[in-house]
Amino acid sequence: MVTSASSLSSSALFQPIKVGAHQLQHRVVMAPTTRMRTPIATGVPTPSMVEYFRQRSTSGGLLIAEATVISPDQGAYPGAPGIWADEQVAGWKKVTEAAHSQGAVIFDQLWHIGRAASPNWMPATKQPVGPSAIAAQGNNLFDGGPYVVPHALTIPEIKDIIQDFVKAANNAIRAGFDGVELHAASGYLLDQFINTSSNKRADAYGGSIENRARLVLETVDAVVEAVGEERTAVRFGPFMGFQSMEDESPYETWGYLTEQLQARHPNLAYLHFVEPRDTYAPPDDKTKELVSLDPFRAIWRGPFISADGYTNNLKLAEDTANRTGNLISFGRGYIANPDLVLRLKHGWPLNPYDRSTFYFGGEKGYNDYPIYSVEKQSSVEETTETQGAPVDLVQA
C-alpha cells in the first residue's frame, strides 16, 4: 500500500476523550473552515452543505461548523451562513441531523466580525463597529478596498451584542448543534477587544488586561447561562497577528483569560487555541524568540484543541497529541479529504487541496474530493502549496 505517512492509529490522536457531555472516539477535529457557500441574500445552509458535513462526519468525531453570523446588523463576508433567523435554523438542522446520523458531535462557531466588515456588506444604515475608532491595516479580505474606521461601540451597544451571542447560541441548540464555539480569534470583534493594538478604550472595556478581557468573559458567562458550560467553548489566537492584531503582553493577557475561564467555568466543553506560526520555524532559525501555547495548556485542565498548520506537518500533529494529549484540528486537510480520519489512521495518502476553490463557488472543490480507495491503491501526493488567498479563514 502506498502511504503518505506512517499510520497514526497508535498515537494519542486515536485515544478517546470526553468533550462536554460527549465521549469522543478520537482526537482529530474538523476545524471551522469558512467556505461561503450559502446564498448571499439569506445565509441559509444549502443541501450541498448538508452533504459536505455528512461526508466529514465520523462516529465519535468532533466537527466545528464554519463561522456563523450572529446578527443581520453586523455585516459579514458574502456567502457566510447565519443563525439569527428561523429559516437559517431550519437549514442548519438538516446539517446537524446529517452529522448525527454518522455518529458525530457537531458544534457551531459563533461570529461577529466587528471592524473587519466592509460597508458594502452592511445594512444601509449601519457601519462596521469595533472597540475603538481604529481601522485595521491593509485591504478588506473580500472587498478589495481599505478597511474603514469603525464606530466605537457604546456600552449599551456592547450589551446588545452579548445578547446577540446568546440568541445565536440558543438558536444553535434549537438547530441541533451539540454546542457552540465563541470565535475570539483571527482579528474579529471579541479578539479586537482583547488586543492592545485595536482597543484604546478608557472605560470598563479597555486599558487593563482585566478590562480588555471583560467582553469575552461576559459573553461566555451569558452563553453558559443560556445553554450550559458543557455546550460552550472558546477559540483564541494569541499570536496570530491576522488583521492587524497585536498585544503588548500576550502571555499575561491570554493567561488571565485562561485563568478566569478555569476558575469561572471549569466544565466548558473545550478551549481551542491557534498555534503560533513560530512553532513551525526551523530549529536553527534564531531570528525571533520561539513562542508557545504551553503556558495556557498548563492552566486549563479541560479539553484543549490545538490548531494551525497540521495538514502540512502530520508528524507535528502526532507529536503534539502525544506530548500534550490535545485534540488536533485540521482545516485544509478536511477540506480536501472527507475521509481524513481514516487516512490518518491508516497512513493513506492525502488529496492535495485546491486553494482557488476555498471560498465561494459550487461543488468544485467542495463535495467532489474523492474518498480513498484501498482497492485502487491510488497514490496522491500531499501538497505543500502555501500561496494565494488568506489562510487564516481556512483556519487550520
Image (tube, rainbow, N blue to C red):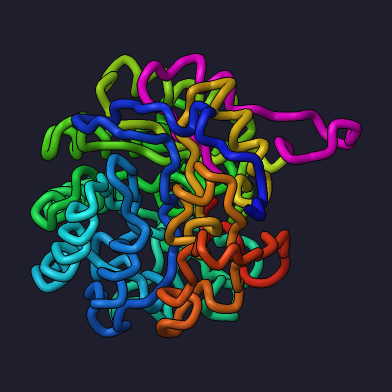
Quarter assignment of residue 19: top left
Does residue 186 appear in the picture of this structure? no
Q: Residue at x 44, y 64 (%)?
A: 34
**Relative side of 268 to 335, left or right:** left
Quarter assignment of residue 43: bottom left
Residue most toward the front? 375
User: For this rendering, which residue is in front, 281 or 160?
Assistant: 281
Does residue 62 appear in the picture of this structure? yes
Q: Residue at x 27, y 35 (%)?
A: 220
Q: Residue at x 20, y 37 (%)?
A: 231
Q: Residue 159's spot in the image, x, y percent?
A: 22, 46
| 220 over 95 or under it: above or below | above
Residue 131, magenta (yes or no): no
Residue 285, magenta (yes or no): yes
User: For this rendering, which residue is in front, 77 or 95?
Assistant: 95
Q: Which residues are magenta?
A: 278-307
- State the count of labels: 0
Q: Residue 356's spot in the image, x, y percent?
A: 60, 78
**Relative side of 150 to 222, left or right:** right
**Relative side of 213 to 310, left or right:** left
User: For this rendering, which residue is in front, 244 or 60?
Assistant: 60
Q: Residue at x 63, y 53 (%)?
A: 1
Q: Residue 311's spot in the image, x, y percent?
A: 60, 51
